[in-house]
Image (cartoon, rainbow, N blue to C red):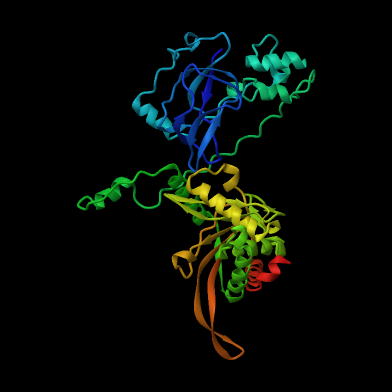
Amino acid sequence: MPTEILMPALSPTMEEGTLAKWLVKEGDTVKSGDVMAEIETDKATMEFEAVDEGVIGKILVAEGTEGVKVNTAIAVLLDEGESADDIAAPKADAPKAAPKEAEAKATEAPAPSKPAPAAAERAEGERIFASPLARRIAADKGVDLAAIEGSGPRGRIVKADVEAATPGAAKPAAAPEAKAAAPAPAATPAGPGAEAVKKLYADRSFEEVKLDGMRKIIAQRLGEAKQTIPHFYLRRDIELDALLAFRGQLNKQLEARGVKLSVNDFIIKACALALQQVPEANAVWAGDRILKLKPSDVAVAVAVEGGLFTPVLKDAEQKSLSTLSAEMKDLATRARSRRLAPEEYQGGSFAISNLGMFGIDNFDAVINPPHGAILAVGAGVQKPVVKDGAVTVATVMSVTLSVDHRVIDGALGAELLNAIKANLENPMAMLA
């Protein structure tokens, strides 16, 4: 029976994507792991791999098509012995929705597809859908296909399912799914709608810019963040002269290795160590509870065309400055070309947003949920400071810590910011 290849959800926030490029054509043979297409999500361009073997019988969605909903059939895969003639035509009793009906349906959340029956629930004699390769492997291993729950499209049993199965052992029936939580009410649009705004500028010249997936997600997530997260802000000035001198010495010693440390590399390290020094603040909001993380996974905002990414440096407290520098450069480069994998920009408990290189003295950053805090970093500028009753000049950087009050209270936030300041003003201690 021909198998529909469905538009995958390549990130947790993906609802639709652009089928940027097909890397196969009708009639090509594919096997598990072969890259079939490039798909643009709200965050990145990712490769889509085949999960089964067969022949591409028909391509249903042309490359370059935008707004393809997740779980929409994009191609048909034929098994051994099948041909394009076996591809079923659309059912007569399922006519295409009328325009008004389709528009109404588009506003509703897509209904979850009915899961295939668990292995233990299959009725005797019920047809088992499995790929030819999965059947051959099952026969070789002595695995009963009826005891396997398929992970492929429409519950189809694929190679990976059979390889993970224990010969002769039936998979226990799946536990009943927890009742899905009621969907949150749709957010009320902030301000007047598009048509109302356009009327205000009807006599002015303007260009209408269509929102891409990234811009929509940024608007949605940060709008929710400001509406639902009780932000409070803590500010400190940090003297950088000791750090700048120490950085200069290190860069001279590392020059032969082609390593050049930035001030931002020291900020990342200082924050990672501070999260270890104040472990109660290394936490995220999880709806009805707080999750306290053990490693310091620090996200760093990277500006890209049309938006931003926050790639995460995992276990940052354990890494050397040169390692953090190299890793950050790699993540930033791939972020700008939208080549990050979802696991590289998801997670973390803390974020850094540095606008100092743009000459910004100070600003307040918006928390990226579920993070507990974000540090907004301004430029280092020379200012007069008073030390031991005498006025002197120092390079001072202003920072603002935006804190989720549900996760971190005022005194704890102050303790975290003081630890960050102490690390940056005593940089040599960060290497101890």
Q: Which residue is located at x 61 percent, y 24 percent?
A: 32
The quadrant in which residue 35 appears is top right
| Near-viewer residue (252 or 76) | 252
Q: Report whether residue 402 is seen.
A: no
Which of the image's four quarters has the C terminus? bottom right
Tell me where residue 307 appears, x and y as whole percent. Answer: 45, 50
Q: Which residue is located at x 30 percent, y 46 percent?
A: 208
Outermost residue toward the left in this view: 203
Q: Is residue 306 left or right of residue 114?
A: left
Q: Report whether residue 120 is seen.
A: yes
Q: Which residue is located at x 54 percent, y 57 percent?
A: 367
Q: Is residue 140 left or right of residue 217?
A: right
Tell me where residue 85 appears, x and y as whole percent. Answer: 47, 8
Reply above or below: 214 against 302.
above
| Near-viewer residue (220 or 142) | 142
Outermost residue toward the bottom in this view: 389
Tell me where residue 140 appears, x and y as whole percent. Answer: 75, 14
Q: Is residue 151 left or right of residue 46?
A: right
Tell me where residue 201 appears, x and y as whole percent. Answer: 24, 52
